[in-house]
Amino acid sequence: MKLHSKVKLALICSIGCALSGSLAADDSTLVKMAQAMSAAPISISGQATIMDNDGTILREGSNGWTCMPHTMPGDNAPMCNDAVWMKLMQAVGSQSDFETDRIGISYMLQGDVGAGVSNATPYHPDPKNAEDYTETGPHLMIVVPKEMLAGITDDPKSGGPYVMWGDTPYAHIMVPVTDPE
Ligand SMILES: [Cu+2]
C-alpha cells in the first residue's frame, strides 16, 4: 500500500468543475472520488483531500481529512481519515512502528464488507480464510493511546465497539454505527 506517492495529478478541481466538462477527468476518476467521499458525511468529505489507492492525489482538500476509495473489484470499503489515521495506515503499509499520544478518527460509513481482515493482524496471508475473519457494516475507527484500550472487548461479535489488531502497534476501536445486516 503506497499512501505517500510523490505523484500528484494536476487535478486541482472540485467535482463540480470536472462535471461541468471544463476538465477531462475520466469517468473512473469521478467514480473513485464519489466512492471515497461516501465514506464520511459530506461536511467532512466535501473539503477533504481525495487520494487514490496508489497514493495519487485526485483532489487537494483544505480541512485536514483524506478520503480514499479503497475499493477493489467485489468490495466497497472507502475511508476518510484524519492525520493520525493517515499515519497509522502508512505504518501498516510499511510494517513500521506506530504510536500515538492523541485520538485519531477514521470514517467508514460504507463498511468494509468484502474487504474484511483478520481481527488479530493486518498481515494475515489469507485474511478471507482466517478463523477470525471480520467484516463490519458502517463504522468509525478510533485509535487512542494504547493504555486507553483496557477493558474493551476484542470480540467483533459482541454487538458493540471492539478492539481490532489489539496485539499490534495498530490496535484501534471499531465502532459499528448501524445494526448488522
Ligand atoms: Cu474499518
Image (spheres, rainbow, N blue to C red):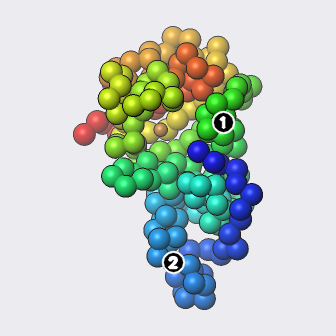
Q: Can you see residue 60?
A: no
Quickly name the residue at label 1.
94
The image quadrant of residue 154 is: top left
Q: Amino acid at mark 1?
A: Ser
Check the image and name the residue furthest to the left. Answer: 181
Quickly name the residue at label 2.
26
Q: Is residue 64 above or below residue 163?
A: below
Q: Can you see residue 6?
A: yes
Which residue is located at x 70 percent, y 50 percent?
Answer: 4
Q: As rendered, which of 32 and 126 lies closer to the eye?
A: 126
Which residue is located at x 54 percent, y 87 percent?
Answer: 20
Which residue is located at x 64 percent, y 14 percent?
Answer: 147
Q: Amino acid at mark 2?
A: Asp
Check the image and name the residue furthest to the front. Answer: 125
Instruction: Give the secondary structure at mark 1.
Output: helix
- Tell whether 48 sits left or right of 36: right
Label 2 crowd bin: few (<14), some (14–19), many (20+), radius 10 Å: few
Please report whichever mark, 2 or 1, sits nearer to the chain's N-terminal start: 2
Q: Is residue 163 above or below residue 136?
A: above
Query: Residue 28 in the image: x percent, y percent?
Result: 47, 71
The reply to whether the residue tagged 1 has its Cβ within 8 angstroms of ligand 1 is no
Q: Quadrant of the N terminus?
A: top right
Q: Given contact means CB atoms under 8 Å apart, are the residues at marks 2 and 1 in contact?
A: no
Q: Is residue 109 above or below residue 127?
A: below
The reply to whether the residue tagged 2 has its Cβ within 8 angstroms of ligand 1 is no
Disc 2 from disc 1: Cα separation: 30 Å
Q: Quadrant of the C terminus?
A: top left
